[in-house]
Image: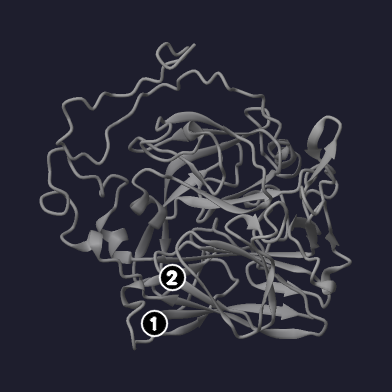
Amino acid sequence: MSVNQPGFTIPRRSIAGMEGMYAKMWDPPKESPLTPEYIAPTNPVPEFMQSVIPGFSVSQRHTVQRDLLHGLTIPTWETPAAKNLMFMTFRDGDNPFDNGSYPGGTIRVPRGVIYHCQTQGHGPPPHTIHWHGIEPTPMNDGVGHCSMEIGDYLYQWQPNFIGTYFYHCHRNTVQHFEFGLFGMLLIEPPDAYANPATAGGYPRRTAANLADFPQFADKFVEGDPVNGVGIITPDGLVSGDPHAFTVEYDVEALWVLDDRDSVWSDKAPDARTFYPALGKQPGVDDKFFHGFFHDYNADYWFVTGVPVLGHRGEGSLASPVPIQNPALVFGTADGTIPAALNSGVTGMQVAINANVGDVILVRCLDAAYNCISVTFPVDVIIIAWDGRALGVPPFGKYNHAYVVPAGTPIHTSTARRYDALIRVDAPFSGFATVQFIDTHGQNIPGRAEPVLVTAKIPITIL
């Protein structure tokens, strides 16, 4: 086997003679090539979900199922609704409660397992899943034109860093991501699902280096100052304490901050509206509604699928009450995310309800096409950005966890994530403020950033 004589060939359509042709895409091969690097999956989460979710049935051992592309129509929040917003969603074929939700169901994976996801594309092909922030082999990375683009594919990778990630379709990405074709991906400690009696609830653990924060001393486990979660043995570097450089948290809140331009929903009703026809000139004689592709103007906003009840220029309360039609969106009657949409884990919140002394973990994703500014009413400790814990060896010399004082805005841009810890020693009731910023008017000297809408997320600590 060599470069000139490979043992396996992945068929791709030749582009010889097409150098001067503009084409957004063409359909790739329909069948999966042989993947000789196949390693048996070891992810215990699907079997755990089968044990706790009625009707859940594992179709492939230790393998997550994700189908795409499924339409979901959600009426806007006004009474009566001003219009219907079209969403494109993922679906879990093994899970009777996940027939397509916005955002997609949260995938939780223990660090170090061999993860498999069987993906089937529906609707106009091709489709991929990009595991944003994970570092798999190129053919399992799910980036269009650079990896598999077929309708039926088995993704394989191994997560090595505990943290907050997300997954999304990476074909026709501009439209598909805007239309909600994404979900959260959380990497947890290796033993997160080791005990079935506790795997579905709290407390849980996540990566952090809190050696400089004594208020977390009873919750934090240190590790090797040089090798982090590894230890040196006669056989080399091996995994050590699964809890090394982690902190235990009692309450978990997921804030997926998103915006929608309803004109895009109106004018791009199918998955290929954004595709230029072969031979057409993009933006000139294709089938885009004239000018709208380059003119994004959000007019509806969401916090983890919960609508922000306000129009441009208004402040609003991000209500924990779910949308009733359709019934299957994030948020239950008690304000928590259903276990069936959270890898079998019960109790993840949007609006925060906790007790004094609890360690509260907030996972925040900017899923909007505009920038976001979040202001907490209490001090928070930022322990991770973009899936990487700050200060955890071997990268500890380059960064560290840090305090963001109450009232200090945290600015983020599209696709960025951070993990924040809250722990207070007295009761508190207030709101975190979320400003959705109009990117069109950012960074203009002498001009304040234009805020489109302000949402408020309740935080109650008794």
Residue found at x 42% / y 41%: 143
Residue 371 badge: 2
Residue found at x 55% / y 18%: 36
Q: Can you tell which quarter of the image residue 70 is in? A: top left
Name the amino acid type tagged 1. Glu
Q: How crowded is mark 2: few (under 14 residues within 10 Å), some or many (20 or more)?
A: many
Residue found at x 60% / y 64%: 418
Q: How many marks?
A: 2
| Residue 55 relative to residue 290: left or right | right
Nearer to me, 74 or 2:
2
Name the amino acid type tagged 2. Cys
| Residue 425 relative to residue 125: left or right | right
**Dots 2, 1 in contact, CB < 8 A:** yes
Which callout, 2 or 1, points at the residue further toward the start of the chain?
2
Percent across and percent down for residue 288 are 19, 54
Is 446 situated above or below 140? Answer: below
| Residue 144 relative to residue 405: left or right | left
Is 40 situated above or below 432? Answer: above
Give the labeled residue for mark 1: 449
Nearer to me, 399 or 313:
399
SS for tag 2? strand
